[in-house]
Image: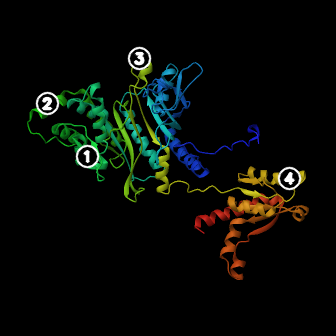
């Protein structure tokens, strides 16, 4: 056979790594969850906005192009005038661009929310995806920490609106100014210390996981875990370590006595504007939330909260779920963070050349949805499959009549579909209904059509009867699984059967 007559190679269907196909149940669960979140945001006076999936790469801020393409963490391409564009990494940087570009037309403070997919060009792994959904809320143009306090209150209200009860969550609040002040006081200020500062912040972020002793090791020479793997530490001196531990635990500094190093750090902290301003702002947030009725069981000040992004400039906050779940190793662990955020006064300013204060938070939709499923708070209202209108005859008049039945059901808000496959094998239609878990089948053959009637088959009850009923008495007492009604009574009878099925589900039958 000649080459040009070879059979074409069949294309292999394959999902790109780090991406997922979403099925109906997950889509509905997300819609249910985001509708409840929107309701809270709207009540707080926030309005929706939507930005595109692509931004010019320089607008994302965190990334710079390399020599060939700007692919460090983002998916990028060049447009027709050779400008680099990237899929958005988060929803905050695009908002900053939107505000700056429309600054003259925007009413400040600008209070907005948006949900959408973000993309990370990173190595995928278990539970780590390259595309996932976030749900953000932001206030731009409000310099006072009352805006940060309100964000924390809105986060708490959102979790409760989703059915997470008090005691199962806490919003933890800190201020990056406090940490920045301490880091500067122990000698980690300046650009040349950026790497060491990041190591320190990562160590503090492990407080919940490793406790104060583990954090001490990570701030010092390093820590060896149970498997023997060693994590190199930040290399701080003992006095600096104890100052940091005292701050994140909100305890007085007791170590070091009157050593020269301790006196040096204390003097630097006393003079640190950032450090003192940070604690003053935290006290004001604490006062505001308590006045509004939010106790420490819902929102608490916690100087161990770090938040990783570089652009935070003030208060930072994290929504943490405190109940236990079983991880993939079979261990009981606290579920942990489902979202967070903070003040980012410098992000909009990059475009403006003038200060523009902003604060906001982001919810990880997939992670929060997993938590809600663990608690049984999602998908309680299972979507009922469509009523199936079967097809007994393929001529135009019959098809029109079956379609009319289908539309009559839909017009009354009932999910319904007319069978679209090969109608000549009626058994296949009932098999299809069974696989779809259809609650009811509508049947009209020649005899029923001549009398202006339809058969209504209760498929759920029929399935139960065939599996459970063992004697004639039970059969007589059971709900009839198939009835013959005039065409005019079709919709009313279907509603009646669906209501009975719903009642059975509620009773757990």
- Residue 113: image location, x then y, percent: 50, 35
First in residue order: circle 3 vs circle 1: 1
Q: Secondary structure at mark 3?
A: loop
Which dot marks residue 353? 3
Query: Whole-Å distance between the Cαs marked 3 and 2?
Result: 36 Å
Q: Residue at x 46, y 38 (%)?
A: 122
First in residue order: circle 3 vs circle 2: 2
Dot 4, crowdedness within 10 Å: few (<14), some or many (≥20)?
some
Dot 3, crowdedness within 10 Å: few (<14), some or many (≥20)?
few
First in residue order: circle 3 vs circle 4: 3
- Residue 414: image location, x then y, percent: 71, 54
Above or below for 318 versus 461: above
Q: Would you name the residue on which mark 1 appears?
A: 223
Q: Nearer the viewer, residue 107 or 264?
A: 264
Quarter of the image where the C terminus is located: bottom right
Which dot marks residue 399? 4
Quarter of the image where the N terminus is located: top right
Query: Whole-Å distance between the Cαs marked 4 and 1?
Result: 74 Å
Q: Would you name the residue on which mark 2 appears?
A: 264
In the picture, measured across the screen, residue 430 lies left or right of residue 283, that is right
**Looking at the image, do the residues carrying marks 4 and 1 touch, with CB atoms under 8 Å apart?**
no
In the picture, measured across the screen, residue 489 lies left or right of residue 215, that is right
Query: Whole-Å distance between the Cαs marked 3 and 4?
Result: 67 Å
Q: Secondary structure at mark 4?
A: helix
Which dot marks residue 327? none
């Amino acid at each position: 056979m000649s080459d040009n007559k070879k059979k074409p190679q069949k294309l292999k269907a394959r999902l790109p790594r780090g991406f997922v196909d979403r099925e109906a149940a997950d889509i509905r669960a997300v819609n249910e969850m985001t509708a409840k979140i929107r309701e809270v945001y709207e009540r707080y006076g926030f309005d929706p906005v939507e930005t595109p999936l692509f931004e010019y790469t320089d607008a994302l801020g965190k990334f710079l192009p390399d020599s060939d393409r700007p692919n460090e963490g983002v998916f990028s391409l060049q447009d027709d005038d050779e400008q680099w564009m990237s899929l958005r990494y988060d929803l905050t940087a695009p908002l900053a661009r939107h505000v700056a570009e429309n600054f003259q037309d925007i009413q400040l403070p600008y209070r907005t929310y948006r949900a959408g997919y973000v993309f990370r060009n990173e190595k995928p792994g278990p539970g780590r995806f390259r595309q996932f959904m976030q749900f953000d809320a932001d206030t731009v143009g409000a310099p006072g920490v009352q805006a940060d306090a309100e964000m924390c209150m809105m986060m708490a209200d959102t979790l409760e609106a989703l059915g997470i009860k008090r005691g199962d969550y806490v919003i933890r609040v800190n201020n990056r100014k406090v940490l920045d002040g301490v880091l500067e006081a122990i000698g980690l200020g300046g650009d040349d210390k950026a790497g060491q500062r990041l190591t320190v912040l990562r160590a503090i972020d492990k407080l919940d996981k490793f406790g104060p002793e583990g954090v001490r090791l990570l701030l010092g020479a390093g820590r060896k875990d149970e498997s023997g793997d060693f994590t190199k530490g930040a290399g701080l001196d003992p006095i600096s370590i104890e100052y940091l531990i005292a701050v994140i635990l909100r305890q007085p500094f007791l170590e070091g006595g009157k050593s020269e190093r301790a006196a040096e750090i204390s003097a630097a902290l006393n003079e640190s504007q950032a450090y003192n301003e940070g604690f003053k702002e935290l006290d004001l947030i604490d006062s505001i939330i308590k006045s509004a009725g939010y106790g420490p069981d819902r929102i608490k000040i916690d100087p161990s909260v770090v938040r990783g992004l570089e652009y935070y400039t003030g208060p930072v906050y994290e929504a943490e779920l405190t109940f236990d779940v079983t991880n993939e190793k079979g261990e009981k662990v606290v579920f942990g963070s489902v979202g967070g955020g903070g003040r980012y006064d410098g992000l909009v300013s990059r475009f403006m050349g003038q200060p523009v204060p902003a604060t906001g938070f982001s919810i990880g939709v997939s992670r929060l949805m997993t938590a809600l499923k663990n608690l049984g708070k999602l998908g309680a209202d299972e979507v009922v499959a469509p009523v199936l209108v079967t097809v007994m005859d393929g001529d135009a008049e019959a098809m029109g009549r079956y379609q009319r039945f289908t539309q009559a059901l839909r017009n009354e808000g009932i999910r319904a579909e007319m069978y679209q496959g090969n109608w000549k094998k009626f058994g296949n239609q009932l098999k299809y209904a069974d696989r779809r878990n259809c609650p009811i089948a509508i049947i009209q053959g020649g005899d029923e059509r001549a009398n202006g009637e339809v058969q209504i088959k209760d498929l759920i009850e029929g399935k139960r009867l065939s599996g459970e009923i063992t004697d004639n008495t039970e059969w007589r007492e059971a709900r009839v699984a198939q009835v013959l009604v005039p065409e005019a009574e079709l919709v009313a009878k279907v509603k009646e059967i669906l209501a009975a099925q719903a009642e059975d589900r509620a009773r757990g039958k």
